[in-house]
Image: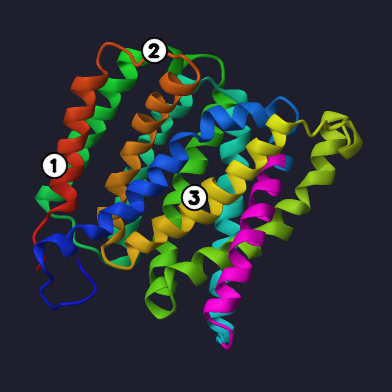
Amino acid sequence: MYRNSVSLPSVSTYLFALAPLTAAALWGGLYGVSKWGFDAIPPLTLAFLRVLVGAAALLPIVRLRYPRREFTRRDRLAFLTLGAVVAASLATQFLGTAFTTASQGSLITVLTPIFTILLGVVLLGEDLSARRVAGIATATAGTVIVLSGQYRLAELAGVATTGILMLLLASATWALYTVLGKPLIERYSALETATYSCVAAVPMLAVLVPFEFTWTETSLRAIEFTPRVVLAVLYLGVLGTAAAWYCWYKGLEFVDASVISAFFFIQPIVGAVFGATLLGESLGSRFVLGGIVMAAGVYFVSTESNP
């Protein structure tokens, strides 16, 4: 439901969609860009660099915007918890992406909105209306149609069991990050919540880097920071983290977590367009049909009447 009970103009009512749409568009390019990074940087180290750059981009902005903000001990703990959850999400996401194929990663991504809805109902007491259920089911079907035209769904049953498990954990923890952020956003702001959760995640991922170097028998000196690798890190940190996390949480300032979750379905759609445009990949025979079905599902969820 919308946070304010005051009736809004019809156009303004739907402006909130621009924020999660922007986040989904930015995340749509993550797979291809991450592949550039994985060519030179181990997964956990790349996740650490991602949040480090993201925090460096966000922190000066939030300091200027809220120079005298003070937090209670309870809220400091809440930000640390949020940082731990998102650190776990990024670690499992990057490990899962490294161990699986594009089709497996895209299919598992579809589960994130479902996890978000369930957690929103359990943890936030959100309403689960028939319209929202129908919309999520329709969006899920549309996304699967798109992916079935682009990939072989049978690959999901391949040998990458560990990678699939990691991606499942990444989906569940990102849903938890979305839901747990809602109360902090309501007390403070989307900018502060995205920033301080990102800052909290930096040391948590940093401690994993030495273990990864030992495990992979690599070192910082062995990493070659070519222009393409640097561009990948900057994209992941500035756009995929700082901008996208803020936009995702900005949507949560206006609607329930279950509503915002529907926009997550757009990520693999945008990713397919990204791959076709920049990497020369085929969109697949079912892209248009699936895209229309998915868009209808998102529309059902995002335009539900206010109570």
Judge by depth and name the residue closer to the eye, 65 or 267: 65
Q: Is residue 89 above or below residue 100?
A: below
Residue 57 part of the magenta-drawn span: yes
Picture coordinates of residue 47, whole percent (x, y): 66, 44
Q: Which residue is mark 2?
A: 282
Q: Which residue is mark 3?
A: 173
Instruction: Pick the quarter of the image with the N terminus.
Output: bottom left
Q: Indicate the secondary structure of the residue bearing disc 3.
A: helix
> Circles 1 and 3: CB distance less than 8 Å?
no
Picture coordinates of residue 90, whole percent (x, y): 58, 45
Q: Is residue 125 above or below residue 202?
A: below
Residue 209 shown left or right of residue 168 in the figure: right
Q: Indicate the secondary structure of the residue bearing disc 1.
A: helix
Q: Which residue is mark 1?
A: 134
Residue 216 part of the magenta-drawn span: no
Instruction: Pick the quarter of the image with the C terminus.
Output: bottom left
The image shows a total of numbered marks equal to 3
User: Quarter of the image holding residue 298?
Assistant: top left
Pair 2/1: label in front: 2
Q: Is residue 32 above or below residue 90?
A: above
Q: Earlier in the sequence, mark 2 or mark 1?
A: 1
Residue located at (28% from left, 28% from top): 143
How far apart are the two marked residues, 2 and 1, measured between alpha carbons?
30 Å
Residue 199 shown left or right of residue 240 in the figure: right
Picture coordinates of residue 295, whole percent (x, y): 20, 36
Q: Which residues are magenta?
A: 46-68
Q: What amino acid is at disc 3? A: Thr
Q: Indicate the secondary structure of the residue bearing disc 2.
A: loop
How far apart are the two marked residues, 1 and 3, measured between alpha carbons?
24 Å
Q: Is residue 47 above or below residue 74?
A: above
Q: What amino acid is at disc 1? A: Ala
